[in-house]
Image (cartoon, rainbow, N blue to C red):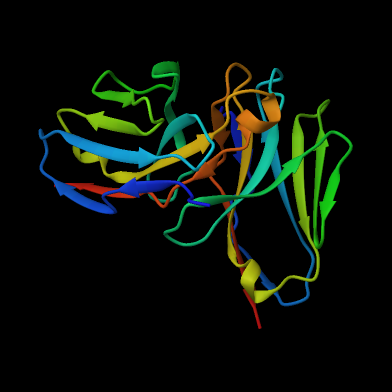
Amino acid sequence: DAGVTQSPTHLIKTRGQQVTLRCSPKSGHDTVSWYQQALGQGPQFIFQYYEEEERQRGNFPDRFSGHQFPNYSSELNVNALLLGDSALYLCASSLWGSPTESYEQYFGPGTRLTVT
Amino acid sequence: RKEVEQDPGPFNVPEGATVAFNCTYSNSASQSFFWYRQDCRKEPKLLMSVYSSGNEDGRFTAQLNRASQYISLLIRDSKLSDSATYLCVVNMGSGYALNFGKGTSLLVTP
Protein backbone atom coordinates (compact mmCIF):
# COMPACT_ATOMS: atom_id res chain seq x y z
CA ASP A 1 0.00 0.00 0.00
CA ALA A 2 1.73 3.15 -1.23
CA GLY A 3 1.91 5.92 1.31
CA VAL A 4 2.04 9.65 0.65
CA THR A 5 4.92 10.61 -1.60
CA GLN A 6 6.42 14.05 -2.18
CA SER A 7 8.99 15.46 -4.55
CA PRO A 8 11.58 16.79 -4.49
CA THR A 9 13.00 15.94 -1.05
CA HIS A 10 15.23 19.01 -0.92
CA LEU A 11 15.27 22.26 -2.85
CA ILE A 12 17.39 25.39 -2.76
CA LYS A 13 16.03 28.55 -4.34
CA THR A 14 16.97 32.20 -4.47
CA ARG A 15 14.80 34.97 -3.07
CA GLY A 16 12.28 36.14 -5.67
CA GLN A 17 12.15 32.83 -7.53
CA GLN A 18 9.15 30.54 -7.87
CA VAL A 19 8.90 26.92 -6.74
CA THR A 20 6.55 23.98 -7.36
CA LEU A 21 6.25 21.08 -4.94
CA ARG A 22 4.43 17.85 -5.72
CA CYS A 23 2.44 15.32 -3.72
CA SER A 24 0.75 12.00 -4.41
CA PRO A 25 -1.77 10.91 -1.79
CA LYS A 26 -1.99 7.53 -0.10
CA SER A 27 -3.81 4.94 -2.15
CA GLY A 28 -7.57 5.30 -1.66
CA HIS A 29 -7.40 8.88 -0.42
CA ASP A 30 -8.96 11.77 -2.33
CA THR A 31 -8.09 14.85 -0.26
CA VAL A 32 -4.76 16.62 -0.01
CA SER A 33 -3.72 19.22 2.55
CA TRP A 34 -0.52 21.23 2.60
CA TYR A 35 1.31 22.41 5.72
CA GLN A 36 4.38 24.55 6.33
CA GLN A 37 6.66 23.65 9.25
CA ALA A 38 9.31 26.15 10.24
CA LEU A 39 12.20 24.98 12.39
CA GLY A 40 11.12 24.41 16.00
CA GLN A 41 7.42 24.99 15.23
CA GLY A 42 4.42 22.78 14.62
CA PRO A 43 3.04 22.46 11.08
CA GLN A 44 0.81 25.33 9.93
CA PHE A 45 -2.11 24.68 7.60
CA ILE A 46 -1.80 26.27 4.13
CA PHE A 47 -4.78 24.87 2.22
CA GLN A 48 -6.76 21.75 1.40
CA TYR A 49 -7.94 20.35 -1.94
CA TYR A 50 -10.81 18.01 -2.72
CA GLU A 51 -12.41 17.36 -6.10
CA GLU A 52 -9.83 19.67 -7.68
CA GLU A 53 -11.06 22.66 -5.67
CA GLU A 54 -9.51 24.53 -2.80
CA ARG A 55 -11.85 23.80 0.09
CA GLN A 56 -10.20 25.58 2.96
CA ARG A 57 -7.32 27.98 3.32
CA GLY A 58 -5.14 29.01 6.22
CA ASN A 59 -3.57 32.38 6.88
CA PHE A 60 -1.12 32.42 3.98
CA PRO A 61 -0.70 35.10 1.30
CA ASP A 62 -1.78 34.71 -2.31
CA ARG A 63 1.82 33.91 -3.23
CA PHE A 64 0.91 30.40 -2.12
CA SER A 65 -1.32 28.62 -4.61
CA GLY A 66 -2.15 25.05 -5.40
CA HIS A 67 -3.78 22.62 -7.70
CA GLN A 68 -5.26 19.16 -7.54
CA PHE A 69 -5.35 16.85 -10.54
CA PRO A 70 -7.99 14.26 -11.49
CA ASN A 71 -5.77 11.48 -10.11
CA TYR A 72 -5.87 13.30 -6.71
CA SER A 73 -2.22 14.32 -6.80
CA SER A 74 -1.48 17.92 -5.95
CA GLU A 75 0.99 20.75 -6.43
CA LEU A 76 1.92 23.63 -4.19
CA ASN A 77 3.30 26.73 -5.89
CA VAL A 78 5.03 29.58 -4.13
CA ASN A 79 5.84 32.76 -6.05
CA ALA A 80 8.25 35.57 -5.18
CA LEU A 81 10.05 33.52 -2.57
CA LEU A 82 11.10 35.20 0.66
CA LEU A 83 13.79 34.08 3.09
CA GLY A 84 10.99 33.35 5.57
CA ASP A 85 9.53 30.74 3.23
CA SER A 86 12.39 28.41 4.16
CA ALA A 87 10.69 25.47 5.86
CA LEU A 88 9.64 21.85 5.59
CA TYR A 89 6.56 21.61 3.39
CA LEU A 90 4.35 18.68 4.29
CA CYS A 91 1.58 17.13 2.27
CA ALA A 92 -1.10 15.14 4.06
CA SER A 93 -3.77 12.95 2.54
CA SER A 94 -7.12 11.86 3.87
CA LEU A 95 -10.48 10.55 2.76
CA TRP A 96 -13.25 13.11 2.43
CA GLY A 97 -16.30 11.83 4.15
CA SER A 98 -17.07 11.06 7.74
CA PRO A 99 -15.37 13.37 10.24
CA THR A 100 -13.18 10.57 11.59
CA GLU A 101 -11.77 9.66 8.22
CA SER A 102 -11.34 13.24 7.12
CA TYR A 103 -9.59 14.41 10.24
CA GLU A 104 -7.12 11.50 10.29
CA GLN A 105 -4.44 12.73 7.95
CA TYR A 106 -1.35 10.85 6.83
CA PHE A 107 1.75 12.84 6.06
CA GLY A 108 4.39 12.49 3.39
CA PRO A 109 8.12 12.86 4.16
CA GLY A 110 8.06 16.51 3.17
CA THR A 111 10.09 18.80 0.93
CA ARG A 112 12.76 20.83 2.67
CA LEU A 113 12.91 24.24 0.96
CA THR A 114 15.81 26.60 1.57
CA VAL A 115 15.57 30.15 0.24
CA THR A 116 18.85 32.03 0.03
CA ARG B 1 -3.15 33.54 22.25
CA LYS B 2 -2.20 30.51 20.16
CA GLU B 3 -5.04 28.12 19.27
CA VAL B 4 -3.20 25.07 20.59
CA GLU B 5 -0.70 25.39 23.41
CA GLN B 6 1.55 22.68 24.80
CA ASP B 7 4.04 22.30 27.61
CA PRO B 8 7.27 23.84 26.29
CA GLY B 9 9.51 20.93 27.33
CA PRO B 10 11.93 19.39 26.76
CA PHE B 11 11.21 16.43 29.00
CA ASN B 12 14.23 14.29 29.91
CA VAL B 13 13.18 11.08 31.68
CA PRO B 14 14.84 7.75 32.48
CA GLU B 15 13.68 4.51 30.90
CA GLY B 16 10.68 3.09 32.70
CA ALA B 17 9.40 6.47 33.87
CA THR B 18 5.87 7.75 33.42
CA VAL B 19 5.56 11.10 31.66
CA ALA B 20 2.53 13.29 30.99
CA PHE B 21 2.04 15.95 28.35
CA ASN B 22 -0.62 18.62 28.57
CA CYS B 23 -2.30 20.69 25.91
CA THR B 24 -4.99 23.37 25.86
CA TYR B 25 -7.00 24.61 22.88
CA SER B 26 -8.92 27.83 22.41
CA ASN B 27 -11.60 26.99 19.83
CA SER B 28 -14.59 25.56 21.68
CA ALA B 29 -16.08 24.46 18.32
CA SER B 30 -13.26 21.95 17.80
CA GLN B 31 -14.55 18.42 17.44
CA SER B 32 -11.59 16.14 16.84
CA PHE B 33 -8.37 15.79 18.76
CA PHE B 34 -5.16 13.87 18.14
CA TRP B 35 -1.66 13.25 19.30
CA TYR B 36 0.97 12.98 16.58
CA ARG B 37 4.55 11.91 17.02
CA GLN B 38 7.40 13.45 15.01
CA ASP B 39 10.91 12.07 14.94
CA CYS B 40 13.80 14.40 14.16
CA ARG B 41 13.61 15.67 10.55
CA LYS B 42 10.77 13.27 9.74
CA GLU B 43 7.08 13.71 9.03
CA PRO B 44 4.45 13.70 11.81
CA LYS B 45 2.77 10.34 12.34
CA LEU B 46 -0.60 9.80 13.95
CA LEU B 47 -0.10 8.33 17.41
CA MET B 48 -3.71 8.23 18.56
CA SER B 49 -7.03 9.97 18.35
CA VAL B 50 -8.46 11.37 21.58
CA TYR B 51 -12.04 10.62 22.50
CA SER B 52 -14.28 12.21 25.10
CA SER B 53 -14.36 9.04 27.15
CA GLY B 54 -10.58 8.79 27.14
CA ASN B 55 -8.74 6.05 25.36
CA GLU B 56 -5.77 3.81 25.82
CA ASP B 57 -3.39 2.14 23.39
CA GLY B 58 -0.85 -0.04 25.16
CA ARG B 59 1.39 2.21 27.25
CA PHE B 60 -0.30 5.37 25.94
CA THR B 61 -3.40 6.97 27.47
CA ALA B 62 -5.13 10.06 26.10
CA GLN B 63 -7.70 12.14 27.96
CA LEU B 64 -9.96 14.97 26.84
CA ASN B 65 -11.74 17.51 29.03
CA ARG B 66 -14.06 19.57 26.82
CA ALA B 67 -15.20 21.84 29.63
CA SER B 68 -11.63 22.90 30.36
CA GLN B 69 -10.55 22.57 26.70
CA TYR B 70 -7.68 20.42 27.84
CA ILE B 71 -6.03 17.32 26.36
CA SER B 72 -3.42 15.08 27.91
CA LEU B 73 -1.16 12.21 26.90
CA LEU B 74 0.32 9.81 29.44
CA ILE B 75 3.17 7.48 28.52
CA ARG B 76 3.89 4.68 30.97
CA ASP B 77 7.07 2.60 31.18
CA SER B 78 8.97 4.90 28.78
CA LYS B 79 11.23 3.27 26.21
CA LEU B 80 14.27 4.75 24.48
CA SER B 81 12.27 4.54 21.25
CA ASP B 82 9.66 6.94 22.66
CA SER B 83 12.16 9.80 22.25
CA ALA B 84 10.50 12.19 19.81
CA THR B 85 8.45 15.38 19.64
CA TYR B 86 4.78 14.95 20.55
CA LEU B 87 2.35 17.24 18.78
CA CYS B 88 -1.11 18.06 20.12
CA VAL B 89 -3.51 18.47 17.21
CA VAL B 90 -7.03 19.88 17.06
CA ASN B 91 -9.29 20.31 14.07
CA MET B 92 -10.02 23.94 13.33
CA GLY B 93 -13.71 23.74 14.07
CA SER B 94 -14.81 24.33 10.49
CA GLY B 95 -13.73 22.07 7.68
CA TYR B 96 -11.08 19.44 8.08
CA ALA B 97 -7.89 21.44 8.55
CA LEU B 98 -5.76 20.56 11.55
CA ASN B 99 -4.25 22.99 14.01
CA PHE B 100 -0.96 21.84 15.54
CA GLY B 101 0.69 22.83 18.77
CA LYS B 102 4.37 23.66 18.79
CA GLY B 103 5.22 20.21 20.12
CA THR B 104 6.89 18.93 23.25
CA SER B 105 10.22 17.18 22.98
CA LEU B 106 10.78 13.96 24.95
CA LEU B 107 14.17 12.37 25.51
CA VAL B 108 14.22 8.99 27.25
CA THR B 109 17.64 8.13 28.63
CA PRO B 110 19.12 4.75 29.65
The spot of residue A28 in percent (x, y) is 54, 37
Q: Residue at x 23, y 23 (%)?
A: A63
Viewer-side residue, A22 vs B107: A22
Q: Is residue B26 above or below residue B36?
A: above
User: Does B56 sit left or right of B93 as displayed?
Assistant: right
Q: Quadrant of the N terminus of chain B?
A: top right
Q: Residue furthest right?
A: B53
Viewer-side residue, A107 vs A17: A107
User: Does B77 sit left or right of A28 as displayed?
Assistant: right
Q: Residue furthest bottom?
A: B110
Q: Residue at x 50, y 29 (%)?
A: A30
Q: Is residue B11 above or below residue A100?
A: below
User: Does B96 sit left or right of B34 as displayed?
Assistant: left
The spot of residue B105 in percent (x, y) is 57, 58
The spot of residue B23 in percent (x, y) is 69, 41
Q: Quadrant of the C terminus of chain B?
A: bottom right
Q: Is residue A58 above or below residue A41?
A: above
Residue A51 figure quarter: top left
Count of labels in the image: 0
Q: Residue at x 70, y 35 (%)?
A: B33
The spot of residue B27 in percent (x, y) is 66, 21
Q: Residue at x 18, y 28 (%)?
A: A79
Viewer-side residue, A40 vs A79: A79
